[in-house]
Amino acid sequence: MDSTRIQPVGGDHAIEVMAIGVEWVMPPLDDGQIASLQAVYEASDALKGFLPTLTPMQAFVLQGINQPLVVDPNGNQQLAPANVMPPQFIGRNGGFDLQRLDATGKATWIASIRPEFISVNCTAYDRWKNVKPQALEILRPFLDVAMANGAKVNAIGLQYQDAFRLLDGASPAATGQLFRMDGKYIPKHLFEQPSFWHCHQGWFSTAPDGRRVLNNVATDITDVNGAHFARIGGQHRMFATSVDGLTPMPITAGEIDQILQCLHNENIDVINAILSDGALRAIGCTGETHE
């Protein structure tokens, strides 16, 4: 790959953002459970030191929308009489965000605690071997308390966005250098396109322990304020069920590390199959590892 024409956005890697998410089985966490998670943060010097900015979120639930219908003798339908209370927006605890800012004021780490999920986003990506331990240090205290208070994991997700600058613009020559032309993920006709294109796809795979994994991959050639980029967005989610969806396979807090590594390996397989050998060398990916 010609580095004067195509450059990874991270210099020695191409990752713009990495995100890890833990989704809860419905119903979502209630106000008391969310409050217990904020108490975890308030009691942790390590969390407050790394993520010093807390922003509370307010949520609103529309109640009273199930107003019954009344059918008159002629078969006409109308809403129930006026003594039925009209719909109302009821405030509830929507969770909170925790942020770490760099010297320019940009958020480099964000932890989002919501009734439906907990996520950690990193835009200051270094390498997986460095970023994963930090993400787990953020997640574990919240997961331990939430699960001790009855929360159950529905799925765990890992998301990456890799990006390359196309300094000479989008063209078949650029995409032919960047992507693996004989690969299985990009249709051959896209290599003939003179300008922008996108290819979005998804499939299920089986984790080593038999759980279901959903893989979504979006490959795009885009224009951003006059600059051309190639982006690969990979989202991999492992569910607390067998691959056929018929057998529950509950996820414990002790499995989070192992599951994230499995999802990371799924991402490695996709990246290795999409990018050319030259592009893989440029981001330090040997074909077996994507540090």
Image: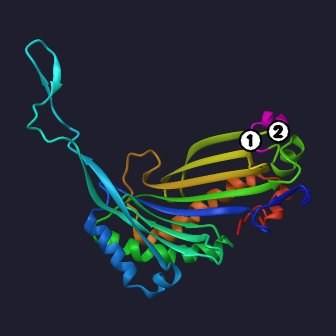
Its colouring scheme is rainbow
Check disc 2 and give the amino acid type.
Answer: Phe
Q: Is residue 125 left or right of residue 229?
A: left
Specify the farthest residue to the bottom. 45
Q: Are marks 1 and 2 in contact (CB under 8 Å)?
A: yes
Sequence-wise first label, 1 or 2: 1
Q: Any magenta on residue 187? A: yes
Of the residues tagged 1 and 2, which is closer to the observer?
2
Q: Quadrant of residue 131?
A: bottom right
Viewer-proximal residue, 124 or 52?
52
Q: Is residue 182 above or below residue 80?
A: below
Q: Which residue is mark 1?
A: 186
Residue 191 tag number: 2
* Circle 1: element type: loop
Badge 2 element: helix
Decide if residue 69 is on the left or right side of residue 247: left
Query: In the rendered view, does 281 fall on the left or right side of 212?
Result: right
Residue nearest the observer in this picture, 223 or 260: 223
Residue range in magenta is 183-195
Position of the C terminus by quadrant:
bottom right
In the image, residue 231 above or below residue 87: below
Disc on res. 197:
none
Residue at the image position 86 percent from the left and 54 percent from the top: 167
Mark 2 is surrounded, within 10 Å at the Cα level, by few (under 14), some (14 to 19) or many (20 or more) other residues, namely some
Q: Left or right: 114 with respect to 262?
A: left
Label 1 is placed on what type of residue? Ile
Residue occupying image coordinates x 82% and y 58%: 279
Q: Position of residue 152 (x, y in %)?
A: 34, 62
Rendered location of residue 23, percent (x, y): 42, 58
Residue 202 in the image, given as x and y percentages of width and height: 59, 43
Report the residue at 23% width, 39% height from top: 65
